[in-house]
Amino acid sequence: MQQSSSRFIELESVALKELFKRESGAIGIYLPARGEDGKVQKSLASIASQAKALACKMKKRCVLQTLLAIENSVEGDVPAPVRMLKVTVTPEGEYTPRGERYIAANLS
């Protein structure tokens, strides 16, 4: 993981622009930056929005997944889970099973 130049991303495995230049199946992991309130929801939404916009621009699609890293502790307080965003590049026109169900339900 490396530092990001984006104000919404604290650490990244690969820059978003570079991710969409790679082949389908490429994966990027992004640790969102905390806002003034200490929460990451706005950063997660911004990263997801940037990923979708870049996917459209590069004529690709992407699958977004939120990951939770939970630390197990036997001493004292258990730290809060860490939320991350996983972005997987897919070719245009390829849908996940969930996406196919959604399309079938809404187009019939």
Image (cartoon, rainbow, N blue to C red):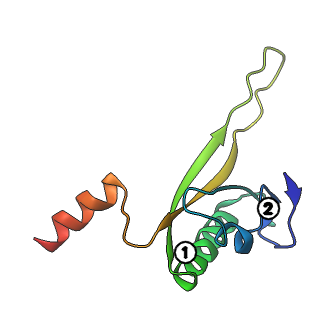
Q: Nearer the viewer, mark 2 or mark 1?
A: 1
Q: Where is residue 73 in the image (x, y as percent from the top left)?
A: 78, 20
The residue under label 2 is 33
Left or right of 101 on screen, residue 98: right
Q: Outermost residue, left direction? A: 108
Q: How far apart are marks 2 and 1 (CA)?
A: 19 Å
Q: Residue at x 57, y 81 (%)?
A: 58
Q: Which mark is residue 26?
A: none
Residue at 81% x, 66% y: name it. Answer: 36
Residue 104 lies, with reference to residue 49, above or below; the image says above
Determine whether the residue tagged by mark 2 lies in a helix, strand or loop.
loop
Mark 2: which amino acid? Answer: Ala
Query: Toward which corner of the image does residue 103 lie, by quadrant?
Result: bottom left
Expressed as whole percent of the image width and height from the top left, the position of residue 6 reads 82, 73
Q: What residue type is labelled 1?
A: Lys
Front one among 16 and 74? 16
Tell me which corner region of the image, top left, top right, bottom left or bottom right, holds residue 94.
bottom left
Q: Which residue lies furthest to the front in this view?
A: 23
> Alpha-carbon neighbours of circle 2 within 10 Å: few (<14), some, or many (≥20)?
many
Which residue is at the front of the view, 89 or 86?
89
Indicate the position of residue 22 as horizontal and vertical percent values. 65, 66
Q: Name the residue under label 1.
A: 52
**Image spot of residue 102 (x, y percent):** 26, 62
Q: Quick one: label 2 or label 1, which is nearer the N terminus?
A: 2
Q: What element carries label 1?
A: helix
